[in-house]
Image (cartoon, grey):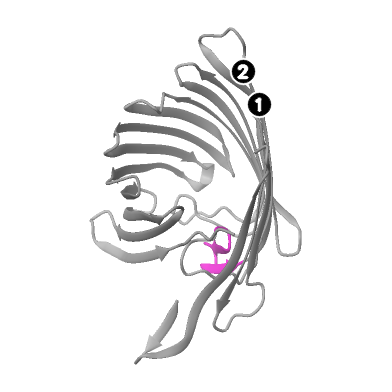
Amino acid sequence: RQETRDLSFQPDYNRILGLKTNYLSTNRKWSGLAGYSQSFSDQVKGQQHAFSIENNYNTRSWSFSSRLSQVGKNYFTDIGFVPRLENYDALTEQVFRAGYTQIFQSLSYNYYPENQTQVQSFRPINAELNLYLDEAGRLYETNAFYNVAVFFANQMSLYLNSYHDAIQLNYAFDPLRNGQFILPDRYQNTAFRLGYNSDYTRQVYGSVNVQYGSFFEGQRSRFGAVAGFRLLPLFNLELNYEYNALDIGALGQADLHLLGLTTELFFSNKLNWTTYLQYNKQIDNFNINSRLQWEYKPLSFVYLVFSDNYNQLLDRKNWAVSLKVNRRLNF
């Protein structure tokens, strides 16, 4: 981005320069990724970097992944979104930027029973661990996830998830938007989710899940469902619904609804148009995001994106149009 006035460049800009490389072993079991980028913005110096190093191992039964990434607090990017950099403190109504380091590990194992006609595989091990460190290298958040699942021969599946988060909350927030704050402190949340997925290769497909667990100083119940219909190679239609019931004791209660619709139109194998419609009751927002994607060369794309936001009365809040072009370079 470069601001101009009267055909003259102004000292108001944002640029990103980056390099990324991928690795794949000859037996295709090992893969890796390394990337580094630097942002350049006016009146900002220092801590403008972002990097990520990733290593993966995959076989039919076992898979392992490890990733180390870091983002400096002054890594500004006007196009795209970097999570966790901007932290809003609802008590002081201020936004604080804070860089972080993320360490991610995952391990999974799939067992394929012989002489089984109903069950395709069991997954007794599927574990993930996320660690977040602040700019001083202190651990402030841990996310642990464990999943077991059974996959049937007809492509249906059942699963059970467990979640455990240990968080050093540094900024107050208002989850119910009623002026009652969860204050900075040390918290631990644990939850369990049971779910079912139908055969997603069929013309009509869907899924459903339920969840219950702790949420800071209270409890959270969740229900989610997906229903889809596809008529390939022409289009795909998918409806998503999520309901959350929050009970945070003296802070209050809330019923939150999130409804989304996704449509995909395929003009050819290189040109498609995707539109997302979403209504979020918690923030009173109706969003339209429409993207036209063209693969003009192998793995090289042009994206034209239109985004529009409205309130519950369909009064426009804001809108934006973005154009992105990338080109794959082979060495």
Question: Does residue 99 belong to the magenta stretch?
Answer: no
What residue is at 28 percent from the left and 44 percent from the top?
Answer: 265
**For residue 287, above or below residue 19:** above
Circle 2 — which element?
loop
Q: Which residue is mark 2?
A: 112
Amino acid found under the numbered disc labelled 2:
Tyr
Which quadrant of the view contains residue 10?
bottom left
Q: Which residue is mark 1?
A: 61
| Residues drawn in magenta | 83-97
What residue is at 34 percent from the left and 45 percent from the top?
Answer: 269
**For residue 179, above or below residue 204:** below
Observer able to see residue 103? no
Tell me the distance, in whole angstroms, between the alpha carbons under discs 2 and 1: 8 Å
Percent position (x, y) of residue 135? 71, 64
Quadrant containing the C terminus in the rendered view: bottom right
Amino acid found under the numbered disc labelled 1:
Ser
Pointers 2 and 1 in contact (C-beta within 8 Å): yes
Q: Report the number of discs.
A: 2
Percent position (x, y) of residue 41? 55, 79
Circle 1 — which element?
loop
What residue is at 31 percent from the left and 65 percent from the top?
Answer: 319
In the image, 91 versus 150, the foreground residue is 150
Percent position (x, y) of residue 258? 37, 43
